[in-house]
Image (cartoon, coloured by chain):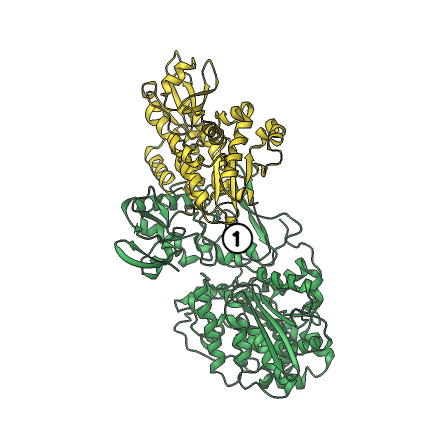
Chain colours: A yellow, B green
């Protein structure tokens, strides 16, 4: 068995899931491997759908064989398992043929993300499971976690494209604690860069020739749910989704920007729970009127953060809150 | 089952693993507000009102979806919880156009009760759905989408019924509930969407605006007949307990509305029993496959629309209120020397589908509909309240002669298994010439979705399936598709627990409430001396005087069915 000790290698490497939630990959694998069941599933999440995040696109374009290799390692590590490659339609168009070729006879089925349901929520792990089961792409209650009760009620390992890429690197002994950064917005050198994971945002921007010469703010962690940082706050490394978007502080239409976020979230959510469905709508109302009512907004933030069904709703306040507190004030 | 210990608000509670915090709180008299939760359905955790905090866990959680785990420490009330409940409720109000005077929940509205309790401003946000449309489903149900709070209980319950009349479609960045445009689906008018909607987005056609209409025409002789299932449920609308028997109070209250006669549909049920028992035996003799019950118009429509290949199996016997309506307009009117055209028959039913049934042209006898108007239990209660008639305090009066005294068999028609039990009691007599020693046929009683029983008597054997819910009936029909001889008789009632859980009944409709309503019907039967349809003196009399030949019996007691294409227009 070539991958006998992959789980201990994963644990030793300290690799954390690269979809944004940051769960230790080794623990997740171990949990699925040790779960008692006749059948198990592996899902590679290639549903990347947040604005200005395109690292999985880059990886699928440049290193698809490494991603498939990562899934193959999972198939060999987890007994009685088969896999789904859950991919958004656009990426399927671009890379479908190549992926199929690489998959060959491996038990990996490509499943295209359905766009008729909540577009963005369709990338959340339990929504992916629901979608593959033929249901609406809506989040499930946790617990039970998918590692115990997942696809068709079998233990299921869901990892992101980038995570599988690094699994293959770790198996080869070539992992150097790097990650992929999407850098975009008003920068000279837009792109995806593979750099050390503990690099500060400031250094990432400097090393890629992207540190702005104007007063700016940055959105970190995705073009919809990412939090806003001021230049002096960028001496920190990224703990979640590695996407950096740069905005010119002078020229950016702040209400327009918030409007884009809220429209994306309203279109991308599943509308199942009250705070996310109705709360975001009321935030949009304020943005449309270019008028923030602080008390109401605070009430909406509280219910979104603390009472939403899933991470989409709970994380939706970060960009608004930070932009309003730091930039709009 | 593993036992775990948790605490709720500091109180130690022993729980079975898998029980929800909501369930455990309820059992321990700890109140947690709910709205979208319904014990018949999956917990969807959408309204975010049953909020709790769990020590050591971030954020707030919902009691309906949180399962007990060893050592959990739960708090159900705190300033933060109160604040969040308040905002979420204000958001729910913002998508719900208030029409409180005209709502099936009326004084029982949980939203309003919570609004008072939490001191919130129900109009804090403008109504998002104020221009949303109303849809009417045939002559039975209205869906006012401007009141819908997107809990999707209707979607689930309709799916469980095997009807799937609702779709979720995207409109302006929202996934909204719509009646389907799919021509292969149609509403069966059971009203379970209404019974499971927490906010009154559904009501029956005429639920408010038309409640006085049927009583207005004073030139007519007005005869009211009330269904079996109402006598143990309508009390709930007047603050009485579910299952409180109010038969004679109900008669007195209806009489106070100024009507001429009050008869009991259970008497009609005794005639249905006679005819259905005959049909059942004939079908078994001829070996022509299963005999499907015909009392429930939603079930009949379900077969006509979704499974037309079974139309020939449905008993041709008319439903109890249709038979009694016909007897009122023929036998009774003639005896009273009244022109049947001057008689107006109003049925009080637990059912939204009966509004559809009475519109069926094939029921017309000599140019006249057996029943002119159907009112639901809720509608009658509303009218009584409007006229200040208090069911609780009114002095009981018996129903009128000659169509006011039913057998116990006629009364249990209101509960799943009741039709089968009544028919079997009479069929046994028809086969053996003797009455059953024990008429309590417990094998067909109970609230399970599907019950199976085998009945034997003097070389006669019948395999029966007793079903509640059309979704469950689908399972039986699929069995019959494979093996037409799998069952000799199938009783189906579309609503959970039978008519006691009908779409026209008081709200809420929960398993416990339905159990109490059903139990009370069995109690009425148990206390009666007259428990067999064929022994009811008025049944004997009318068979002798009127239904003494096949032709007339067929005209009054039997009907036909048709393959249906979609009726509801959206």
Vertical position of residue A276 compared to residue B473: above or below: above
Q: Position of residue A186 (x, y in %)?
A: 45, 16
Q: Position of residue A214 (x, y in %)?
A: 38, 12
Residue A231 located left or right of residue B565: left
User: Can residue B564 be seen at all in this image of the molecule?
Assistant: yes
Residue that lies at the very extreme toward the bottom in this rendered image: B434
Give the side of residue A173 with respect to residue A324, left or right.
right
Residue B166, given in percent of the width and then of the height, sits at: 57, 50
Between B312 and B381, the one nearer to me in the picture:
B312
Q: Residue at x 58, y 32 (%)?
A: A89
In the rendered image, which quarter contains the N terminus of chain B?
bottom left
Badge 1: chain ID:
B
Return the residue found at the far left: B10
Residue linked to disc 1: B156
Can the viewer see residue B268? no
Give coordinates of residue B96: x percent, y percent: 45, 47
Q: Residue at x 55, y 72 (%)?
A: B417
């Amino acid at each position: 068995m070539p991958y006998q000790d992959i789980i201990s290698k994963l644990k030793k490497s300290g690799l954390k899931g690269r979809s944004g939630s940051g769960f230790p990959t080794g623990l997740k694998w171990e949990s699925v491997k040790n779960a008692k069941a006749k059948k198990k599933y592996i899902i590679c999440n290639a549903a990347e759908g947040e604005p200005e995040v395109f690292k999985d696109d880059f990886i699928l374009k440049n290193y698809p064989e490494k991603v498939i290799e990562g899934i193959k390692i999972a198939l060999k590590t987890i007994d009685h398992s088969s896999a789904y490659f859950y991919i958004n339609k656009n990426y399927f168009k671009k890379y479908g043929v190549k992926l199929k070729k690489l998959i060959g006879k491996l038990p990996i089925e490509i499943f295209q993300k359905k766009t008729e349901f909540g577009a963005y929520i369709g990338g959340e792990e339990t929504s992916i499971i629901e979608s593959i089961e033929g249901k609406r792409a809506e989040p499930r209650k946790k617990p039970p976690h998918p590692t115990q009760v997942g696809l068709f009620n079998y233990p299921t390992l869901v990892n992101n494209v980038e995570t599988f890429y690094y699994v293959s690197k770790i198996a080869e002994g070539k992992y150097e604690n790097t990650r992929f950064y999407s850098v975009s917005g008003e920068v000279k050198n837009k792109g995806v860069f593979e750099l050390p994971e503990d690099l500060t945002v400031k250094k990432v921007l400097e090393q890629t020739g992207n540190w702005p010469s104007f007063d700016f703010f940055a959105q970190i962690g995705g073009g919809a749910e990412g939090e806003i940082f001021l230049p002096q706050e960028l001496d920190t490394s990224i703990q979640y989704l590695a996407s950096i978007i740069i905005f010119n502080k002078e020229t950016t239409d702040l209400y327009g920007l918030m409007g884009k976020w809220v429209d994306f979230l309203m279109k991308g959510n599943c509308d199942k729970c009250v705070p996310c469905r109705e709360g975001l709508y009321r935030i949009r109302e304020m943005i449309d009127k270019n008028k923030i009512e602080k008390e109401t907004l605070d009430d909406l933030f509280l219910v979104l953060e603390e009472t939403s069904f899933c991470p989409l709703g709970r994380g939706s306040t970060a960009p608004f809150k930070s932009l309003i507190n730091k930039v709009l004030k | 089952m593993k036992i775990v210990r948790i605490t709720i608000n500091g109180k130690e509670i022993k729980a079975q693993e898998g029980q929800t915090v909501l369930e455990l709180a309820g059992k321990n008299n700890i109140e947690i507000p709910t709205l979208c939760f319904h014990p018949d359905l999956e917990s969807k955790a959408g309204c975010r009102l049953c909020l709790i905090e769990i020590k050591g866990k971030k954020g707030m959680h919902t009691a309906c979806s949180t399962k007990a785990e060893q050592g959990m420490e739960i708090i159900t009330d705190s300033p933060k919880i109160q604040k969040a409940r308040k905002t979420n409720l204000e958001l729910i109000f913002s998508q719900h156009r208030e029409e409180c005077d005209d709502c099936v929940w009326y004084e029982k509205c949980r939203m309003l009760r919570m609004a008072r309790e939490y001191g919130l401003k129900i109009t804090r946000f403008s109504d998002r759905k104020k221009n949303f449309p109303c849809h009417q489903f045939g002559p039975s149900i209205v869906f006012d989408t401007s009141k819908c709070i997107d809990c999707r209980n209707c979607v689930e319950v309709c799916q469980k019924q095997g009807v799937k009349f609702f779709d979720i479609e995207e409109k302006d960045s929202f996934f909204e509930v719509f009646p389907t445009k799919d021509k292969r689906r149609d509403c069966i008018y059971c009203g379970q969407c209404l019974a499971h909607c927490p906010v009154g987005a559904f009501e029956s056609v005429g639920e408010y605006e038309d409640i006085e209409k049927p009583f207005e025409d004073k030139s007519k002789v007005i005869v009211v007949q009330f269904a079996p299932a109402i006598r143990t449920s309508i009390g709930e609308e007047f603050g009485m307990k579910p299952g409180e028997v109010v038969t004679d109070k109900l008669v007195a209250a209806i009489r106070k509305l100024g009507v001429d006669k009050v008869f009991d549909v259970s008497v009609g049920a005794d005639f249905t029993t006679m005819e259905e028992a005959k049909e059942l035996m004939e079908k078994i003799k001829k070996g022509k496959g299963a005999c499907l019950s015909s009392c429930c118009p939603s079930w009949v429509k379900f077969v006509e629309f979704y499974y037309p290949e079974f139309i020939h199996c449905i008993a041709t016997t008319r439903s109890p209120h249709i038979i009694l309506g016909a007897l009122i307009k023929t036998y009774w009117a003639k005896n009273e020397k009244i022109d049947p055209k001057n008689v107006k028959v109003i049925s009080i039913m637990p059912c939204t589908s009966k509004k559809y049934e009475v519109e069926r042209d094939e029921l017309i006898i000599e140019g006249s509909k057996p029943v002119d108007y159907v009112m639901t239990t809720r509608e009658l209660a509303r009218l009584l309240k409007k006229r200040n008639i208090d069911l609780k305090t009114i002095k009981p009066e018996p129903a009128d002669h000659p169509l006011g005294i039913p057998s116990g068999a006629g009364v249990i028609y209101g509960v799943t298994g009741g039709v089968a039990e009544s028919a079997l009691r009479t069929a046994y007599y028809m086969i053996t010439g003797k009455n059953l020693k024990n008429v309590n046929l417990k094998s067909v009683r109970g609230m399970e979705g599907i019950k199976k029983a085998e009945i034997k008597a003097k070389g006669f054997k019948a395999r029966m399936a007793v079903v509640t819910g059309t979704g469950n009936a689908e399972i039986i029909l699929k069995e019959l598709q494979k093996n037409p001889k799998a069952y000799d008789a199938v009783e189906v009632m579309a609503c959970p627990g039978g008519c006691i859980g009908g779409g026209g009944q008081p709200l809420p409709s929960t398993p416990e409430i339905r159990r109490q309503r059903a139990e009370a019907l069995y109690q009425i039967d148990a206390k009666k001396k007259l428990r067999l349809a064929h022994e009811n003196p008025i049944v004997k009399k009318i068979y002798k005087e009127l239904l003494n030949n096949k032709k007339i019996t067929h005209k009054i007691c039997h009907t036909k069915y048709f393959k249906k294409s979609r009726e509801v227009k959206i």
